[in-house]
Image (cartoon, grey):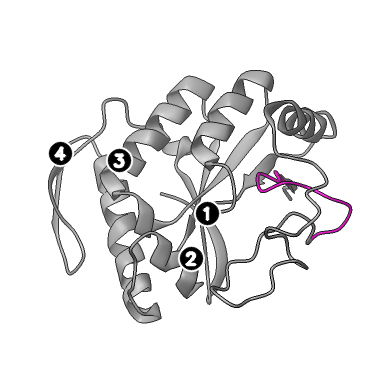
Amino acid sequence: MQFHWFLPTGSDGRTLTTGMRGTHGPGHDTTATGGPGADRHRAPDLRYLTQIAQAAEHMGFDAILTPAGTFNEDPWITCAVLAQATERLKFLVAQRPDSISPTLAAQMAATFQQQTRGRLLLNVVTGGDRAEQARFGDHLDKAARYARTDEWLTILRGAWAPEPFDYQGAHYDVQGAAVFSPPESGQRKILVGGHFGSRLADS
């Protein structure tokens, strides 16, 4: 059994909803869930996030989940910085396929693993909030988003293979996808979340 904690990169407070800015589009009252009128009890500055990461490590948590989205700090940059302030803690970095190419994601993940000696867990989130997806130029319906995620994961894994990887599908057309230093087989953990639940598997 593994235990994970949460990194509040959108600000923190005394309740679960404090600091979580709404993403429901125009007209939605975001005061209760964050937004312009919310009480941002603790800003997600480096000092506070470092305290949380170090505390999670000290208490024996295996990893810390870092969300992705408009109203959070970028998870990759945040976790890369916090990795320098911790020794054992792994970082469960959320990534949506709508906002990054699979080859670049493969490169970023490989670099993170190389520089932290295998402390990345990649959390692939297909996405479900239409307003949030639209901010990144993504207007696909649910079925198409899941089909794209399947292709995205195929290319991500292919880029980690020993030989350059070619792929042509409905959403991606890549030629010679590869990374400089592919992660070792034991460092290819991918957590996939969606309507079918979540699963953690070796890539």
Tell me the residue at 74%/26% (across/down): 47
Magenta stretch, overall SS: loop
**Mark 4 Cα-neighbour bin, 10 Å: few <14, some 14–19, many ≥20:** few
Q: Which residue is mark 3?
A: 104
1 vs 4, front mark: 1
Location of residue 20 in the rendering, given as x and y in whole percent from the top left corner? 70, 58
Disc 1 secondary structure class: loop
Secondary element under disc 4, as helix, strand or loop, is: loop
Residue 176 colored magenta?
A: no
Does residue 55 appear in the picture of this structure? yes
**Which amino acid type corresponds to the residue marked 1 in the rendered image?**
Thr
The earlier-in-sequence mark between 2 and 4 is 2
Q: Position of residue 48 (x, y in %)?
A: 77, 31
Residue, disc 2: 132
Of callouts 1 and 2, the N-terminal one:
1
Frontmost residue, 154 versus 95: 95
Looking at numbered disc 4 in the image, what kind of residue is underneath it?
Pro
Q: Is residue 162 left or right of residue 43?
A: left
Q: Comparing marks 3 and 1, which lies closer to the viewer?
A: 1
Q: Residues within 10 Å of mark 3 (few under 14, many from 20)?
A: some
Magenta residues (range): 6-16
In three-dimensional space, the C-alpha distance between marks 3 and 1, rounded to whole angstroms, equals: 20 Å
Label 1 and label 4: CA atoms lie apart by 33 Å
- Marks 2 and 3 sit apart, C-alpha to C-alpha, by 21 Å
Query: What is the number of the mark on residue 164?
Result: 4
The reply to whether discs 1 and 2 touch (Cβ–Cβ < 8 Å) is yes
Q: Give the spatial CA distance, label 3 vs label 4.
A: 14 Å
Q: Residues within 10 Å of mark 2 (few under 14, many from 20)?
A: some
